[in-house]
């Protein structure tokens, strides 16, 4: 079989549908991915039971299918299931939160309430995944402007992996929520979890079987966030 014949065989199912690639793609988004995307909510309360390791591995595999700058895959993940490790992490993060809030001049009552809330969120979730970025395989530049851009690309790639993970969790019937706190105390997280060199904590994802459907939070209309730039009409 010639290369052209085999290419024709591969592409024939697409042709036989009678739809262009973009029309087929739109249908897929509407019929499969659409509900998954629109049903996902940040879920913050979970049933106590653990999540099967196989399921967690599927979430991690989905995360690692994300696109990444230069395909360097700078994402790293720490999975935590054990109570003691969760408590160690929650205490380390709580201590830093307390220091920051004291420096802000907040009252001890509000600080205590926030620290306990954070402790409960972290220790009561059946599974925690700390998402980290490792910059070391990214391109190196002599100037700060390009170093920052390269670092941002690594962080963007990591965020894309996190979004894949959230959607995969939704697909598995799990609830999940990002907590940004590790970004504010990545050294404390590194110490508490004994992270490998170069792993910088970006976020924590709490995961478990949901006890509620979460809240529907409004989105800005496209007219607020999109500008279609047309010739002769520069965007404002
Ligand atoms: C980068 C990032 C950081 C977030 N940090 C927190 C957080 O620290 N605590 C929290 O409860 N939710 C956090 N969230 C979840 C958002 O509050 C949530 O996505 C938003 O309110 C929209 O709600 P939805 O996810 O249910 O659509 C975070 C989300 C993102 C993307």
Image (cartoon, helix red, strand yellow):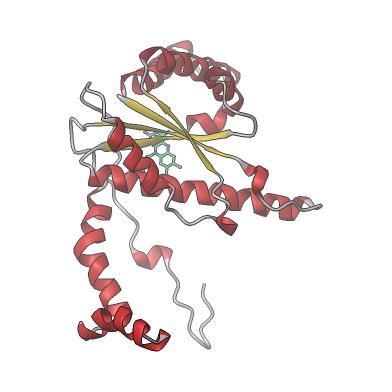
Query: Which quadrant is the N terminus positioned in?
Result: bottom left
Left/right placement of residue 125 relative to residue 87 reads left
Total residue callouts: 0
Which is nearer the eye, 199 or 39?
Answer: 199
Q: Is residue 137 above or below residue 7?
A: above
Ligand 1 image position (quadrant): top left
Confirm whether residue 182 shows in the render: yes
Name the residue: 24% across, 27% down. Answer: 46
Name the residue: 48% across, 84% down. Answer: 230
Which is nearer the eye, 193 or 106?
Answer: 193
* Quadrant housing residue 201: top right
Left/right placement of residue 34 relative to residue 94 reads left
In x, y percent, where is residue 222? Answer: 35, 65
In x, y percent, where is residue 235? Answer: 51, 75
Name the residue: 22% across, 31% down. Answer: 209
In x, y percent, where is residue 42? Answer: 30, 40
Q: Residue furthest right?
A: 142
């Amino acid at each position: 079989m010639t290369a052209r014949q085999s290419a024709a065989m591969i592409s024939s199912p697409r042709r036989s549908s009678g739809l262009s690639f973009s029309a087929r793609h739109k249908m897929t988004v509407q019929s499969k991915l659409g509900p998954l995307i629109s049903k996902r909510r940040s879920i913050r309360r979970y049933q106590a039971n653990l999540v099967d390791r196989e399921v967690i591995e599927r979430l991690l595999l989905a995360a690692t299918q994300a696109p990444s700058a230069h395909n360097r895959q700078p994402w790293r993940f720490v999975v935590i299931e054990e109570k003691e490790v969760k408590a160690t992490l929650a205490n380390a993060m709580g201590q830093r939160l307390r220091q920051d809030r004291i420096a802000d001049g907040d009252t001890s009552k509000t600080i205590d309430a926030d620290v306990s809330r954070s402790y409960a969120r972290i220790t009561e979730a059946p599974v925690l995944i700390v998402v980290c970025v490792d910059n070391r395989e990214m391109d190196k530049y002599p100037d700060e402007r390009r170093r920052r851009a390269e670092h941002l690309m690594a962080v963007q790639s990591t965020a894309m992996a996190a979004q894949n993970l959230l959607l995969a969790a939704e697909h598995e019937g799990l609830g999940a929520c990002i907590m940004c706190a590790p970004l504010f105390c990545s050294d404390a997280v590194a110490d508490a979890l004994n992270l490998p060199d170069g792993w910088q904590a970006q976020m924590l994802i709490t995961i478990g079987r949901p006890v509620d459907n979460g809240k529907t939070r409004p989105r800005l209309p496209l007219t607020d966030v999109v500008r279609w730039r047309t010739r002769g009409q520069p965007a404002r």
